[in-house]
Every structure is written in C-alpha cells, then in structure tokens.
Image (spheres, rainbow, N blue to C red):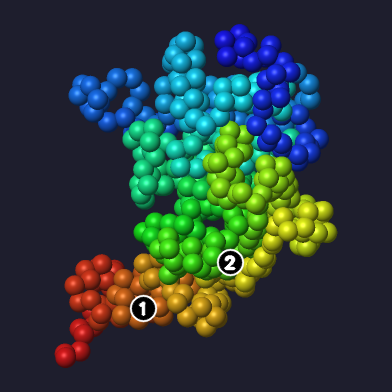
Amino acid sequence: MHKIVFGVLFGAMSLAQAASGFVFSAEPGPHGVGLRTVQQYDYSRTYKARIDVLTRQPSSGERARPLQTLIWYPAAKGGAPVHYIDYLRTVATEEDFHRPAAEIDKVTSTSISGIWTTLSAATIRGEEARPMWAVRNARPAAGKFPVVIYAPSFNASAHENVDLCEYLASQGYVVISTAAIGPHGRAMTMDLEGVEAQAGDIEFLVGYAQSLPQADAAHIAVIGYSWGGLANVLAAARDSRISALVSLDGSVRYFPELVRSAKYVSPERLTAPFMYIAARPRSMEEHATRKFDMSSNLLNDIKYADFYKLTMNPMEHSNFSSEFQRFASDGDRGLDEYTREETSLAMSWMARYVAQFLNAYLKNDTAGLAFMANAPAKNGVPAHMLMVDRRASSGLPPTLDTFAAGLGQRGFGHASEVYAEMQKKHPDFKLGDQVLIDWGYQLLRANKVKESIEIFKLATIVDPKSANAFDSLAEAYQQADDKALAIKNYQRSLELDPSNTNAVERLKTLHAGVTKPAAG
C-alpha cells in the first residue's frame, strides 16, 4: 500500500476531524461509478522539441503529445472506492508515463505541500484519506451513455473537479478528462497557441470516445472551467459533433482578445446549446479598476443556440474547482460573507444544474427541460443562491449547412429563392462562387446532373462576372446533352475571360464557333 495512504487510512478519527469541511451534497444517480486511467499519445502532434532546452541534448523518449486520460463511467455498484490521494497521484504521470512508484510518491508529496501551503499537515492528510465514489476498473453498466469531456482550468489536472465528474458518471454519462498542458511543455501558455492546444486535446478526446464501448459518441458535451471554458468554445466552433457546451466561469468571458484572434469563432458556428455558469458579478467600479476589456462579449452575441446564464452568488472564480474548495484555507477563499457550507452547497447546486442541462439536451429528457425552464425556487434552490437568465435560439444560422437543409426541404429547383430569402433575413450572408462551384462538381461527379445545374446557375447569380461559374454551368449542360445552353454558357465564359482555353476546346467539341468578345 502507498505509504501516504497507509498513514492516513489508519489515522481514523483524528484525521477525519481534520478534513476541510467541503461537503458535496448532490445525490448520486442510479449507477455506481467506475474509474480507468489510460495513458496514450496524440501522435498527430509534436510535444517535445528535438533538443531538450535543459540538457541541450536530443530529446529522449516519445516526442508525441502525452494525454493521460481519466475516464469515469456508469458501473455496477459495490467495490472498494478510491481515495482522494489516488487522484492526486495521477499528477506525477501526466507527462511521464513511466515514473517508478518511489518517484511518484515524492512528486505527489512535494506538489501537495507546495500548492496548499496554508493548511496543516493533518488537514491535508484528512482530505487525502477521503473515500470517493469511484471504484477502479469496476464492471461497466450495460448500455450506451452520452459522453462528457471535461476541460480543466489553466495548468490544472484532470481531476480538479472530480466530484462533478463522478456525479455525472453516476447519472449515466461517460466522463473523460486530461490535464491542461501547454503546447510543448507541462506549463500552459496564456496565448492563442496555448488555448488551441487544449482545444486540440478536446478534439482528440472526441475521436477517442468513438472507441469506448459504453460511449454514445453521437451525443457529446464539453464542460470547461476557466481556461478550459475558452478552449471548449474554440473546439465547438471547429467541431459540430459537440452537442452541448457548459462553461464554469469560463475564460471566453475574460479573454475577448483571444476570442477575436481565433477568427473561426463566431455566433454562426456556435449552435450547440450553451450554459454559462458565472461567479458572482463584479461591480462596474471593479471592472474599471481592473481595466477589463468590455468592448465585446461573445456570450451576448450567441443567438443560434439555446443559451442559459447561471450566476452563483456564493462563488468566486476559484470556487468552481472542488479541489480548491477542499484545500483552500479561509484566507484563500476570498468570500468572507459566505461560509464553507454555503460555497459547498453552491457547488452541489451547480452540479445539479449541469446534470439537468445535459439530460435536457443530450438525452432529450422532458424533466430536464422542465427543470431548466423553472424558476430556481421551484427546483428547490435556497433563496439568494443563484440567478438564471435564459435566451432561446433565434433559429438556424446563416450558413452553407442551413442553405443545404433548405434545399433538402424545397428541392434544388428553388436554390435561388432559398438563397434570396436567407439574404433578406441575414444581409451579411453570402456564399462565394467557388463554394458553389465545388458543391456543383460534387453533384456532377455523383451523376446528379440536374441538381448540379441549379447550383452552378446560382453561382452565376452570386457572381455574374465569374467566368469559372459560367464555364462550370456549361459543362453541366453539356453532360445533360443540352447542347444549345452549353454553347451559350461557354461563350459567356469566354466573353468574361478570353484566355479560357477549356471553353475554346469545348466549343470545338460541340462544333460551335467561338464568338469573339465585343471590342471595348
């Protein structure tokens, strides 16, 4: 048995009394909780540099990105639970999967005493000894379950919100997390490269979920806390397979300059239902003193997704981590007017709202939807605990996908009408001629000639000076054996671009003369 665990398990009453006072009171769901640790690499990304900056020698070992992954899953009930120290020990192997046990002991002990410097040794040992819900390698429950990816805060480890992760597993979710490490070293970097590295980790886990027998990978949510609550927004903007977003006081609110620099992040690409759970609001005077950039706020711009904002009055930013609540001393908590019991209770209610939101949007559960629609008091929330703002989606975003869906309903023959209607509703909406030309050729290669003609026709409407669009339309007419319209459109393409040799050769094939463009 690990020496620290041995010491605390047999300390009994004195150590139990030394625990911090954090109580997670959300009731477990119908399932037991299993736990697995998987040590894997993302071989598509480099992590270690060719030369180690410390030794100035070539880097040794695997250079791919290490992703030690914790998996909590619905399981049969029963079995010996892990203790909190078991989660703390995973920190030592986040980068190096091959550390010996003695070195893991040393790193674990050093990291705990180095971070939680204001707590007594007895209190730390009391927390380490706490039994958790999870049972290592427990027998998985039968069935398929939606997937939740948890993205930790800046530099944080995968277990930082273990109470939330275990709770969601008990409620019927497969929960996956990996540490927030930097692009090329353990330290996260506070820049676009850093947050995109974590977004890449999320995308890796989306792919990894496909391999898990219990995972219903068609229903995936990403929960991000702080920095992870910026990374998950970037990931969702890039991957429409993410079905729901939860942000625990996420940095998407606090780093608008990084949001702006990730130009692919836009309201049109954020269509997954989104719940932002915020710390208690700061005053305008505090914002002015801190010189916080309030010139833009992506949360205000979200309009093509159901959006919820919960404000947790007893919680400052750090209180969204259950590890912080376990180990922070009273002087670290920054909430003099709230007791530990109140902040613990707030975290438990936060977890309930997360579960109900996921039930509503990943399981299509009517009770979850009703819970989210209720006033907090109707859900049994204590007075003054939290506030909820709701904003329903305004409909489908003005995108190529929405346009394609409209054609699916009304037919390709109505392409120009559907496009005009979308432009009337969204004046900034525009499909480039090249996008339409590429689409048209996909249809042509699939032998959907009539449909391709309609898309190429739209391309000539979108850009009536595009020689390429008329050339493509002529090719589709030629494949449809409509010689007259093929000739007409090849000639129009030549008028726009006299150097179009393809049109010249095609007209020769059609035994048609080349009409020279009018002078001037």
Q: Quadrant of residue 496?
A: bottom left
Q: Distance between the residues labelled 1 and 2?
A: 28 Å
Where is residue 145 drawn, in percent x and y?
Answer: 70, 39
Q: Is residue 260 left or right of residue 498?
A: right
Residue bearing mark 1:
463
Decide: is 428 above or below 356: below
Taking depth in this image into account, of 463 and 220 the one nearest to the observer is 220
Kindly identify the residue that appears in the image at 36 percent across and 49 percent down.
191
Which quarter of the picture shows residue 173?
A: top right
Nearest the viewer among 514 and 461 is 461
Asked if 386 appears above or below 191 in the picture, the reply is: below
Q: Residues within 10 Å of mark 2 (few under 14, many from 20)?
A: many
Q: Position of residue 284 (x, y in %)?
A: 51, 68
Q: Can see residue 253? A: yes
In the picture, the quarter occupied by the N terminus is: top right
Residue nearer the viewer, 349 or 373: 349
Q: Residue 117 carries which label?
A: none
Amino acid type at mark 1 = Asp
* Residue ID for mark 2: 304
Which residue occupies the extreme left position in the image?
Answer: 519
Which residue is found at the position 21% from the left and 68% from the top? 501
* Amino acid type assigned to the residue bearing label 2 in the image: Tyr
Instruction: Tell me how many marks there are.
Output: 2
Q: Is mark 1 on a helix, strand or loop?
A: loop
Across and down, in percent, residue 220 comes to 61, 45
Neighbour class for label 1 at 10 Å: few (<14), some, many (≥20)?
A: some
Secondary element at tag 2: loop
Placement of the C terminus among the 4 image quadrants: bottom left
